[in-house]
């Protein structure tokens, strides 16, 4: 029935008229009530409520009367909240208090019982009131603004030290009517003591929600144990905005508990109060933290593993963590902790000093008078001292040098620093002056002792002729950007020849006399680096004596009146750009012999200057360099004036040359370089300076597309995401010999290289060369199936590099053409293919492939394709003259693939096909992310599979330690099944199932897409249709249909595996017979809900027979963790779990059944075993259960569950199991292996402690000894 809605005013008017006509007194709800009184003991909800003598009885009635006008409710006595109280709907602001004017009543809110709720239905403020709760109490704002203003006191009458009160911005447990997901929440805390303040929702209610709004939490007082920006216990949430200006917070979490995520971003402003732990957790997108005054003890960051879709979203979004911190409030250790978990960190520390200051904290409101006091506050990480007026220099060398980080002395309001006569300012700390006057009556000498001394913009000097800048030790750097100076010297104060290096840069200002080396004629200098990119230098000398090893002089702008590049013994590197040079000499140079003497003529160089010096050089070139960095605003002609974008630099270059990255740069969105018809080198090394030493790097978070021929070399490329890639776009792409690739804090996948495009346009010619770097993978052609490309010419050369993912030479999808690939080095951890379709799709490919291998380390497969269903034409011709193949599983020709491709193999005399690989492999757990891992061996190689969603991949590796890099092959992709759980592959011999049924079988459980997971699981089987080729076709063992499973049946029970849960099938060989084990359940939806492990006879691999026997079910406490009833849904029970039966056989005929017990979702999931004692296997009495687990959680690993056993090629026995690394039960399950012993009456795993070994434990195997000759197959001419 649909109810018609009337406004509260209409309803109130009708009610008032009815009361009037009845001759009764009325209390019109429409009257404007600024104040209403409530007395739960003596009040009446029919009273006026407008005076203490005529109070209402309930808050609900008061709220109803205030309706949309709002007002204040005065609680005069204890107001009970015995059940779940919900306010009537209101849009006006309601304030609930026990104080009105100067009168305070003993009013309080008392929650009576556990999990009692006060639910808001409009904006509500609590002020000057006591809240009593001895059990869990909930304030649920339901996405209405909730405020705890001054004077809120929360008490626990039973246990005063125990906090019981939750504040939720959203719902407590959403119901079917709570459908609004986009609303924001607003929580303000100014007083009170609380257990948890939660931005969104707490309990699951009637289902998991994905909220898209923002939680706003403002804390200026109070005492809170935990603050969460997201939901807790269930649900996904949007974004959060948290401000702390006061109060005490035990732990502040950006998101929720466990694996409760913010799918948006988090903004935190912490400028006051105290936070014990700042926990930057579970945020998919960006985190922005301002930390400027809040005291904290610990800061940490982590993302819990959750559902695959969330983890993938995190990796794809690659959210940036940015922090701005005011260092004056924190210790050096705190600053280091903050910086370690953020991608971008900026010190906004700023203290204030002025001529008339009288403060001690050096704040803007109360500046200090003492510059020394201000500098001392920046000891942890430096920062800015803002100088106002005329301030004397009183900073001792000890005070200045005691701190860390650069100190910037920045002036405002005609600021000046006054120095006593004849002052020498010595600093071993980086120091910058800007926007002020250096006022000195006598000599002023500023000395850099292994530090950077910088004169920034806006500096004037009151006595230039008496002012000098100099370095006084190795590592000193002097930079002049403004001001007037008599002398600038790279190194002075020497008492012997100087074997270090000097660095002087002039980008502005005026220098009368500059010595790149030293001004002391008695001593030689080894190495000098000089840059003039602006300003004016009257006289510039290389050095007063000789430069013995290397002089690098860069003239990129500005003016040098007289230039003396004299007395060079060895290398000299000079580049001349737009600097105006009056006169120049190169006198006294020693004979060049083996020295390098290079002169680079840049655009704008003066021809006369070039002519005057060119005879001193043995190498003269014309070249172009432009510099760029994020935030650059210059012309790009010098590192001091970079352009702001890569495309701008490439466009402005105007011809072949180099674009040089001098700082940080990020490509966050798909980006294409501006088109250029000339080759460009992208680098962070301009031939003289390697800017990587100062942190220059490029992060590529999306598609970076070429706009012309590009060589990338001597640069650091970072990967913070899973989709970062460099696309050649069919243009020549070269990765040089010195490309460093890194994972950022956010990254777990290296960048990919693609020679072609990733759109629907064809790239008819590919040239891709790689000589260094660590990469996710490489594709020679285009990476989009929509760009069908014919007659493509692809040339790929790989001389070095590491490739974690597959290397594929051809275009993705349908295509044709010729491919020439030369491989002389590199590590190929996921194989090398001519054609690769990641999803196992079948495409038609027609290529003539010429692959030459002269070196490299090959893992996985070298093959014409990965997917056997790819229809191949053309030719696949392989020549092998070198390389290592201990990690290779197959060197395959084309015969096993669809189509008519021919293939040939030529092996050079240097390759011994019959030589067995030697050496060891060392590994640690874990092997890879996997639930229900299953590993077995066949023909000396290792196979692995695990629980999946809708496609089943089988991995084949030469060594178990190779498994992390395997991409696997899709062997089963059903169209009508999902939740492919607990897969196992077994070989069933003629003795097991008869000669007609002998073969390899894949058992797994699955559910129909319309059925729920778990309850809908049914058991299926497939057979390998190509004999021992386990990467070939799998299909129905009865009909032979490919990719079609057979449902397991029981010949004597037609209802078996139809409408009942059946999962976890495995094979058990006992007393000379072969049986099937499986998991069933009983009592779903009741308190008797439990699982059983059953043993059954079988007529064939898909047909059971007879009555199965229950071998075991939970009976010990360690087997029942996770069992229980949902607190939100009384019809939902979690079972007592036993599952994952695994046969383990001893060397002397012992038979054990290992199994898992307790809920896999708990930390207590553990492995136990039963021992077969002889007799009838169907009699449970003949299986003796070990009373304690043999593998359970510890401080390193939790949630341990069974997998199979296998024997390696060295003859050692290993037990495969699943577990979660760490202590977070929301973490993904991963595959482990440890040695095991099955002997006598005992089965033990690992080190015998009953717990996983530390994750740092190293295991060693010899490398798989299978010779290359035994890995070659399927070549057909």
Image (cartoon, grey):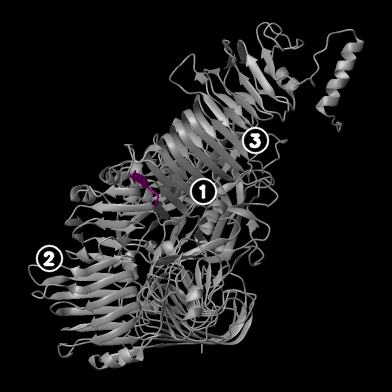
User: In the rendered image of this protein, does residue 873 appear above or below residue 1015?
Assistant: below
Instruction: For the N terminus, give its image quadrant.
Output: top right
Give 614 or 902, whichever is nearer the viewer.
614
Residue 1242 visible in the snapshot = no
Give 393 or 501, whichever is nearer the viewer.
393
- What residue span does the magenta drawing correspond to? 347-354
Query: Which one is earlier in the sequence, the residue at label 1 or at label 2?
Result: 1
Residue 605 visible in the snapshot = yes
Q: Which residue is mark 3?
A: 143
Q: Which mark is residue 493?
A: 2
| Residue 150 horizontal/vertical position (percent) | 53, 24
Residue depicted at x 39% and y 43%: 299
Q: Nearer the viewer, mark 1 or mark 2?
A: 2
**Mark pair 2, 3: CA separation:** 70 Å
State if disc 2 and disc 1 touch (CB < 8 Å): no
Q: Nearer the viewer, mark 2 or mark 3?
A: 2
Give 1163 or 1192, whichever is nearer the viewer.
1163
Residue 352 is inside the magenta segment: yes
């Amino acid at each position: 029935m649909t109810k018609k809605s009337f406004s509260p005013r209409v309803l109130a008017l009708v009610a008032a008229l009815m009361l009037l006509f009845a001759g009764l007194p009325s209390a019109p709800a429409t009257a404007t009530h600024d104040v209403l009184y409530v007395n739960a003991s003596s009040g009446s909800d029919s009273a006026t409520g407008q005076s203490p003598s005529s109070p209402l009885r309930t808050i609900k009635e008061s709220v109803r009367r205030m309706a949309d006008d709002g007002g204040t409710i005065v609680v005069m006595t204890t107001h009970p909240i015995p059940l779940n109280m919900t306010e009537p709907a209101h849009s006006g602001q309601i304030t609930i208090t026990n104080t009105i004017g100067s009168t305070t009543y003993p009013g309080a809110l008392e929650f009576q019982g556990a999990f009692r709720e006060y639910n808001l239905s409009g904006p509500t403020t609590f002020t000057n009131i006591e809240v009593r709760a001895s059990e869990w109490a909930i304030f649920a704002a339901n996405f209405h603004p909730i405020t705890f203003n001054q004077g809120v006191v929360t008490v626990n009458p039973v246990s005063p030290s125990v906090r019981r009160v939750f504040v939720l911005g959203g719902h407590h447990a959403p119901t079917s009517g709570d459908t609004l997901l986009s609303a924001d929440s607003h929580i303000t805390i100014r007083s009170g003591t609380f257990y948890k303040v939660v931005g969104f929702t707490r309990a699951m209610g009637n289902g998991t929600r994905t909220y898209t709004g923002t939680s706003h939490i403002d804390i200026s007082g109070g005492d809170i144990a935990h603050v969460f920006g997201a939901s807790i216990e269930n649900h996904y949430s949007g974004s959060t905005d948290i401000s702390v200006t006061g109060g005490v917070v035990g732990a502040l979490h950006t998101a929720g508990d466990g694996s409760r995520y913010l799918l948006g971003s988090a903004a935190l402003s912490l400028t006051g109060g105290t936070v014990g732990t700042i926990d930057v957790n579970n945020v998919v997108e960006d985190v922005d933290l301002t930390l400027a005054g809040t005291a904290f003890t610990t800061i940490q960051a982590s993302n819990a593993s959750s559902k695959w879709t969330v983890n993938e979203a995190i990796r794809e979004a690659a959210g940036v963590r940015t922090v701005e911190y005011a260092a004056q409030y924190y210790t050096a250790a705190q600053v280091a902790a903050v910086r370690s978990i953020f991608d971008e960190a900026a010190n906004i520390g700023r203290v204030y000093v002025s001529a008339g200051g009288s403060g001690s904290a050096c704040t803007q409101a109360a500046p200090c008078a003492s510059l020394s006091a201000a500098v001392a506050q920046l000891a942890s990480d430096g920062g800015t001292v803002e100088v106002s007026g005329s301030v004397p220099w009183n900073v001792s060398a000890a005070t200045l040098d005691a701190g860390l980080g650069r100190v910037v002395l920045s002036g405002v309001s005609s600021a000046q620093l006054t120095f006593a006569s004849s002052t020498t300012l010595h600093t071993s700390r980086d120091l910058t002056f800007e926007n002020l006057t250096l006022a000195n009556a006598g000599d002023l000498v500023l000395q850099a002792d292994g530090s950077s001394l910088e004169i920034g913009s806006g500096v004037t000097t009151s006595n230039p002729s008496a002012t000098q800048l100099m370095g006084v030790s190795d590592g000193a750097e002097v930079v002049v950007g403004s001001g007037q100076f008599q002398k600038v010297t790279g190194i002075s104060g020497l008492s012997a020849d100087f074997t270090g290096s000097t660095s002087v840069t002039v980008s502005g200002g005026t220098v009368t006399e500059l010595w790149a080396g030293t001004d002391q004629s008695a001593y030689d200098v080894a190495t000098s680096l000089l840059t003039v990119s602006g300003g004016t230098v009257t006289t510039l000398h290389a050095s007063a004596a000789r430069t013995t090893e290397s002089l690098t002089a860069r003239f990129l702008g500005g003016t040098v009146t007289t230039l003396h590049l004299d007395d060079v013994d060895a290398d000299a590197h000079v580049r001349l750009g737009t600097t105006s040079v009056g006169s120049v000499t190169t006198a006294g140079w020693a004979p060049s012999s083996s020295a390098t003497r290079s002169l680079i003529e840049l655009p704008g160089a003066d021809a006369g200057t070039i002519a005057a010096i060119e005879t001193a050089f043995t190498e003269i070139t014309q070249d172009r360099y432009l510099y760029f960095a994020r935030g650059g605003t210059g012309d790009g002609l010098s590192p001091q004036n970079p352009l702001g974008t890569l495309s701008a630099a490439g466009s402005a270059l105007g011809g072949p040359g180099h674009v040089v990255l001098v700082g940080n740069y990020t490509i966050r969105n798909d980006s294409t370089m501006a088109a250029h018809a000339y080759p460009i080198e992208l680098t962070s090394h301009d031939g003289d300076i390697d800017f990587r030493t100062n942190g220059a790097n490029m992060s590529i978070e999306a598609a970076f597309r070429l706009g012309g021929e590009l060589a990338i070399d001597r640069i650091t490329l970072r990967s913070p995401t899973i989709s970062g890639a460099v696309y050649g776009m069919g243009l020549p792409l070269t990765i040089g010999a010195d490309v460093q690739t890194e994972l950022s804090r956010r990254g777990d996948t290296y960048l990919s290289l693609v020679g072609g495009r990733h759109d629907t346009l064809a790239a008819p010619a590919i040239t891709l060369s790689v000589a260094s770097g660590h990469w996710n993978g490489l594709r020679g052609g285009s990476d989009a199936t929509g760009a069908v490309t014919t007659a493509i010419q692809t040339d790929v050369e790989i001389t070095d590099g590491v490739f974690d993912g597959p290397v594929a030479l051809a275009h993705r999808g349908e295509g044709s053409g010729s491919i020439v690939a030369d491989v002389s080095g590199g590590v190929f951890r996921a194989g090398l293919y001519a054609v690769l379709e990641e999803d196992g799709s079948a495409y038609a490919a027609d290529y003539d492939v010429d692959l030459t291998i002269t070196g490299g380390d090959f893992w996985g497969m070298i093959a014409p394709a990965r997917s056997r269903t790819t229809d191949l034409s053309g030719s696949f011709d392989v020549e092998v003259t070198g390389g290592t193949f201990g990690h290779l599983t197959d060197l395959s020709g084309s015969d096993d693939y669809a189509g008519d491709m021919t293939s040939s193999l030529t092996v050079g005399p240097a390759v011994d096909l019959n030589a067995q690989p030697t050496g060891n492999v060392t590994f640690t757990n874990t092997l890879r992310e996997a639930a229900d891992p299953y590993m077995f061996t066949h023909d000396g190689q290792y196979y692995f599979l695990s629980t999946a969603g809708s496609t089943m991949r089988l991995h084949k590796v030469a060594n178990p330690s190779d498994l992390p890099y395997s991409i696997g092959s899709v062997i089963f992709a059903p169209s009508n099944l999902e939740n492919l759980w607990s897969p196992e592959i077994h070989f069933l011999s003629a003795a097991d199932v008869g000669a007609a049924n002998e073969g390899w079988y894949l058992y797994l459980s699955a559910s129909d897409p319309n059925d729920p997971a778990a309850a809908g699981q049914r058991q299926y089987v497939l057979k390998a249709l190509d004999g021992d080729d386990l990467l070939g076709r799998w299909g129905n063992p009865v009909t032979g249909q490919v990719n079609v499973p057979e449902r397991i049946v029981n010949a004597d029970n037609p209802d078996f595996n139809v409408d009942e849960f059946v999962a976890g099938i495995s094979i058990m060989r006992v007393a000379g017979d072969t049986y099937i084990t499986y998991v069933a359940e009983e009592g779903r939806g009741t308190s008797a809900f439990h699982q059983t492990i059953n043993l059954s006879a079988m007529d064939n691999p898909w047909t059971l027979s007879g009555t199965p026997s229950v071998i075991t079910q939970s009976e010990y406490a360690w087997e029942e963790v996770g069992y229980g009833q949902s607190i939100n849904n009384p019809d939902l029970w979690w079972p007592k779990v036993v599952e994952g039966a695994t046969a383990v056989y001893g060397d002397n005929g012992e038979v054990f059944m290992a199994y898992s017990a307790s809920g896999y979702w708990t930390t207590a999931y553990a492995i136990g075993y039963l021992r077969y004692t002889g007799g009838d296997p169907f009699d449970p009495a003949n299986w003796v259960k070990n009373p304690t687990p043999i593998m359970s959680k510890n401080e390193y690993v939790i949630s341990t569950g069974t997998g199979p056993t296998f024997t390696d090629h060295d003859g050692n026995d290993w037990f495969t199991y699943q577990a979660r690394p760490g202590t977070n039960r929301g973490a993904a399950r991963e595959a482990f292996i440890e040695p095991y012993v099955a002997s006598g009456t005992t089965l033990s795993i690992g080190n015998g402690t009953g717990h996983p070994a530390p994750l740092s434990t190293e295991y060693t195997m010899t490398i798989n000894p299978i010779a290359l000759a035994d890995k070659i197959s399927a070549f057909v001419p």
